[in-house]
Amino acid sequence: MREIAPTHTVVANRLINSLSHEARTRILSLCEPVDLVFGTVLCEPGQIFTHIYFPVTGFISLVTSLRDHQPLEVGLIGNEGMLGVTLALGVNNAPMRALVQGSGTALRMTALQMRNELRENEELTHLLNRYLYVLMGQLAQTAACSHFHEIEPRLARWLLMIHDRVGSESLQLTQEFLADMLGVRRSGITVAAGALQDRKLIRYTRGKITILNRKELEEAACECYSVLIRDYFKIFDH
């Protein structure tokens, strides 16, 4: 994880931005900007958190694995959240592997600093408890989605979730990467991506997916996407 020089740009992490000015200023004073490098493992299951991360332009996958199987993504953290939220429960250990799957930037602070802030800042504790509730719902919804839904609507849902976090219509995503994230065979991704392309919802060439019709892609996605979006807004429903 490479540190980068601090800037004075507007913070694009929505969790931090939802804090009051005083609380936000305090958190930002403790953070340092860092690069999120694709493929970097930020923590392993059971490992004690040394740092927590607020993604700004990159995104982090929460993955779980079974013996003799590829890791499966069960959660996604982008500029709507943070990695290390279990500290709000007094739990210092990571529940699963956290892997950078979208290069970009993040704000980082030490786990010790976060624990101190949680003891002193009731507003921060209240917000992170709400975020933790939403993240737990995401994990459960993703598990059900992986078991019951077909590949094509799952792929549409996943592309929408990434689009929400990176804000770009063009995504660098190989078939192998998508197959790993959705826990399916590469041939399944080929068929699903081809079907979405035939419907002119996406364009897929040489590991690059371009979203052509966001509205119809939402209609093609399984119900899980709308559920996850609905639950996200509960963070701010004070």
Image: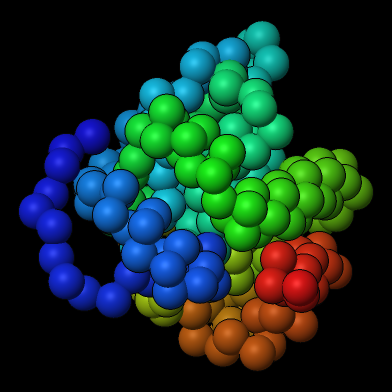
Task: Please state if 123 lies on the left or on the right of 78 as rendered.
Answer: right
- Counting labels gives 0
Task: Please state if 35 lies on the left or on the right of 108 as rendered.
Answer: left
Vertical relation: 98 (above or below) 123 = above
Closer to the camera in the image, 223 or 80: 80
Residue in the image at 49% along x and 57% along y: 78
Task: Tell me residue 91's x, y (percent).
Answer: 65, 24
Confirm whether residue 175 shows in the render. Answer: no
Q: Quadrant of the N terminus?
A: top left
Task: Tell me residue 92's x, y (percent).
Answer: 57, 22
Task: Tell me residue 44's x, y (percent).
Answer: 50, 19
Residue farthest left in this picture: 5
Closer to the camera in the image, 103 or 11: 11
Q: Which quarter of the figure has residue 62?
A: top right
Closer to the camera in the image, 140 or 120: 120
Q: Quadrant of the C terminus?
A: bottom right
Residue in the image at 51% along x and 72% along y: 20
Vertical relation: 32 (above or below) 204 = above
Q: How is the image coloured?
A: rainbow
Task: Please state if 217 lies on the left or on the right of 176 as rendered.
Answer: right
Residue in the image at 47% along x and 24% along y: 49
Confirm whether residue 22 shows in the render. Answer: yes
Residue farthest right in this picture: 148
Closer to the camera in the image, 227 or 127: 127
Residue in the image at 13% along x and 57% along y: 6
Task: Tell me residue 212's x, y (percent).
Answer: 50, 86
